[in-house]
Structure formats: structure tokens, C-alpha cells
Amino acid sequence: MKQFPDNFVWGSATAAHQIEGGWNQGGRGPSIWDAFTHTPGKTNLGQTADVTCDHYNKMEEDVAMMKAMGLKAYRFSFSWSRLLPLGRGAVNEEGVAFYNRLINTLLANDITPWVTLYHWDLPLALQMEKDGLLNPEVADFFARYAEVCFERFGDRVKNWITLNEAWCSAVLGHGIGYFAPGRVSTSEPYIVAHNLLRSHGKIVDVYRRKFQAEQKGEIGITNNCDWREPKTDSAADKAAAQRSMEFFMGWFADPIYLGSYPEVMHQRVGDRMPRFSDADLALVKGSSDFCGLNHYTGMYAAEPKEGEDITIGAPAGNGGMAEDQLVELSEDPTWEKTGMNWNILPWGCRNMLNWINERYEHPPIYITENGYAASDEDDLSVAINDERRIGLVDGYLGACHQAINEDGVDLRGYFLWSLMDNFEWAMGYSMRFGIHHVDFETGKRTPKKSAGWYAGVIERNGLL
Ligand code: GBH
């Protein structure tokens, strides 16, 4: 048996917009994702998350489902516009009551809440009145919202994640327009990333100055990064892979751990790349108690050949900013893939963890998301035999075990994405990530084989 460290955090994860529904219930204000999904042509078949899993009305049932599989920790996000319908100003007490019930129900069942403050669903009013994430002032709105959350919930919530995957807000939301607010630009991603890092810094500053000593919680950021493996061991390909990692993880983690953006980004992005003021940097540097990592997949990276069109093939992987990175991405045709066409590379996960461990000098790491998507699990009889999902998680956890035991990485927890099938953003309901099947007609939840398998891992604190 591959035993994990004592106190290893075994969790599962969701996000408010993907599971709650109740989009205009209980005083909730609209978010940019409501506006985006209600715009024709933006999501698969025009699907929305107005109802999705209806978790807002089925919360107790969902916590019972977690309890039944022995889950130790549950990562979820607050809907900012459920708590502050206009993003600032008045607090919606019905929203506070909902999250109080959720937190209290979790604690009564010995499940530790891990709260993400921002998982992409910016209050629509802040977009329309204030230009959303493009406005430097957004950092003040984030700080005020976070303060309300620490005040209301911090007596019981001890694990805070400020932002989920700022890379996606920047690149997918403001670079290629695939996510809300759907903007297309080659400069805005860098501005948005900058404002999000400043926002993160301000939120953490509020927590540390006003709450942390008394509440004794931890706070950090979650970044996403896919692994980039040098295609050959030529110096040029190794440099290309490293450049690609610096444009992905380094962009968001270097300022926090090293106090500046990667130099290669300044060189290549030029005057589109912002620089931190001394005051901002004082808040950003050292602003994470742990390194949250969402990791799913990877590709080969290589130095592009003369005249090659690097924008073809993997636009999402390169963030639509292929020209800025100048890296050629490719895949090995023998690699197995998930329903999202993401390569299944457990060794990439191990390399990813080691890259963080080395560059940022051994930080505590939590994998705050990892999991398997299927496009063919609508049918319950297929879904409940999800051996491929078990295979992926088993493989990645095996890689985690090696990273901990053979490489000395300080990995402290793992959250499986996702507790149940849900609204997969622009892909709507066409991709299922859950370890529980959800029938979106009836709302019925059914454990898949992976839920039982994961329950065994948690119970044994190890892999067979
Ligand atoms: C996460 O993002 C989100 O936090 C979560 O809400 C979401 O439901 C979950 O993942 C599943 O999608 O096209 O091969 O180049 C995932 C971030 C960024 C990971 C883009 C994969 C592209 C792979 N993703 N990346 S590829």
C-alpha cells in the first residue's frame, strides 16, 4: 500500500456557479456568467447554470452524500453576488444564511470547509458600472467583499482560497473570449492578471491585519497549470518548455514567491506587461500561506521551427497568446486522453510538483483540483462504471505519492474535481467530471464507482 502522510487532506471540489443554480433566488444578484450564458451562442446548446445541480435547494442532501463517502474536506466557492448582490454596498442576509447553513452542516458532519472567494462569477454590476477586472479599483471591491466574508464566516472557516485560476479569467475571459466576460484582446489579459494579483494581495492583507491572529486560519491562492515537457533534450526545447511554464505558472506565482514577473515575460510582452508599484508589491510578495494547484494535463513544448504557425493545434493550451510565448506545443498520439481531449500524464503531475518545489523553495502545496471528464456519461448505466476516472485518479495520486516520498515535495492535500457532475462553463452539460452522477432532468444524484473507490482511499489514507 502507498501510504500518505498523517493529516493528508482528502477532499473534493465544486464551484458556486457550476452547482448552485437558484440564480435569481434568495436575493442573489446576477454575475458576469449569468449574462454570458444568457447570450446566444456562448455556451454549448445555449445551456445556462440557472438551475444546474440545484445545490442551493439540495444542500443538505449533498452534504449527506459527502458524509456517506467519508470525505474529510470540501472545497466550494461563495457566489459574490449572492452575498453582495451589486458587488459592493448592501449585504444580502439570505445569502449569508445559506452559507451559514452549509458551513454548519459540513462542520456537524466533520467535513472541513475550504472556501474559494472568487471562482470567476464577478457581480454583473461591477462589470457594467466599473469595467470589472480591467479597473485597478476592483482590488478595493475584492478587499471589501472578502472582509465581509471573514467577518461573517471566519469564526468557522479556517481555510481560505482567494482566487481560483486567475489565468483563466485573464486568458480565457479577456484574451480569447471563450469565458465571461467574453473579451478578445492581446493586452487585456496582462492587465487583468495584474489586477487580480493586486486583488489577491489586498485580500490577504485584510485577513492578516484584521483576522488571522484571532481566527487562526490559512489563506492562499489557487493557480492552474498544465505541464510542459521538453519535446527533445535539446537546449532550445528545454528553454521553450521552461519559458512556457513561466508564462503559465510563473506569471501568477513568481510575483508572490519571488517578487516579480518572470523576466522573459517582460522581454517578450514588452510594454503590454505591467509592473508592480512598490506599494502593490509589498502586498503581493509573500502573500500565500500555501500554493494551491489545479492540475489536469500536459503537452510537449518545443522551440518553433522557422516559419511554423504555432497558433494552430493548441490555441487553448497556449492561451491564445502563442506569439508572446513562441512555443510549439504538441502531443504524443499514444497518450490516453479524457473526454475533454486532455492528455492523461501522471508523470507530468510529478514533474509539475517538482517544478514548483524547486522554483519556489519547497512551499506547502495542495492540489485543489484534479479529475477526469467524460462526454459519454449521460446514461446512468455507463456513468456508474467509470473505471477510466478511477484510472486517472489512481495514476495521478500515485505520482503525488512519489513526489512526496521520493522527491520530498511538501504536498499536503488533494481535492478531486468534482463531487458531482455540473455545469462545465462554455461546454455546458456536455462534460461530466463528477464522482456522483447527476440527472439534470430530475436532480437525482447517484454515486459512480469512483465515489466508492475514493472512499476506500480516504479510509485507508493510501492507495492499494
Ligand atoms: C478548472 O479549470 C476549473 O477551475 C473548474 O471550474 C472546471 O470545471 C475544471 O477545471 C474542469 O474544466 O486544451 O489541452 O490545452 C481548468 C483549467 C485550463 C485546464 C486550460 C486545461 C487546457 C488544456 N484548464 N487547460 S488543452
Image (cartoon, grey):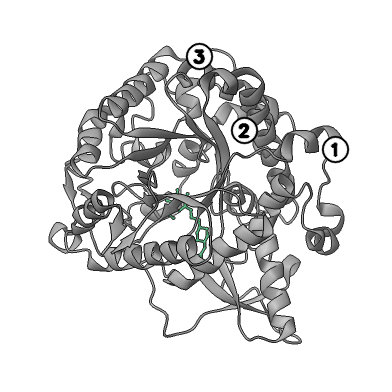
> Distance from label 2 to label 1 (Cα)?
25 Å
| Element assignment for label 1 | loop
Q: Nearer the viewer, mark 1 or mark 3?
A: 1
Which residue is located at x 72 percent, y 86 percent? 305
Residue 297 shows in the view = no
Q: Mark 1: which amino acid?
A: Ser
Residue 284 shows in the view = yes
Image location of residue 393, percent across then percent down: 34, 62
Which residue is located at x 33 percent, y 55 percent? 433
Which residue is located at x 58 percent, y 23 percent? 212
Image location of residue 16, percent across then percent down: 41, 36
Tell me the quarter of the image containing the N terminus: bottom left
Pick the front one: 228 or 96: 228
> Distance from label 3 to label 2 (Cα)?
18 Å
Crowding at mark 2 (Cα within 10 Å: few <14, some 14-19, many 20+): some
| Element assignment for label 2 | helix
Task: Tell me: residue 30, above or below residue 76.
Answer: above
Q: Mark 3: which amino acid?
A: Val
Tag shown at residue 91: 3
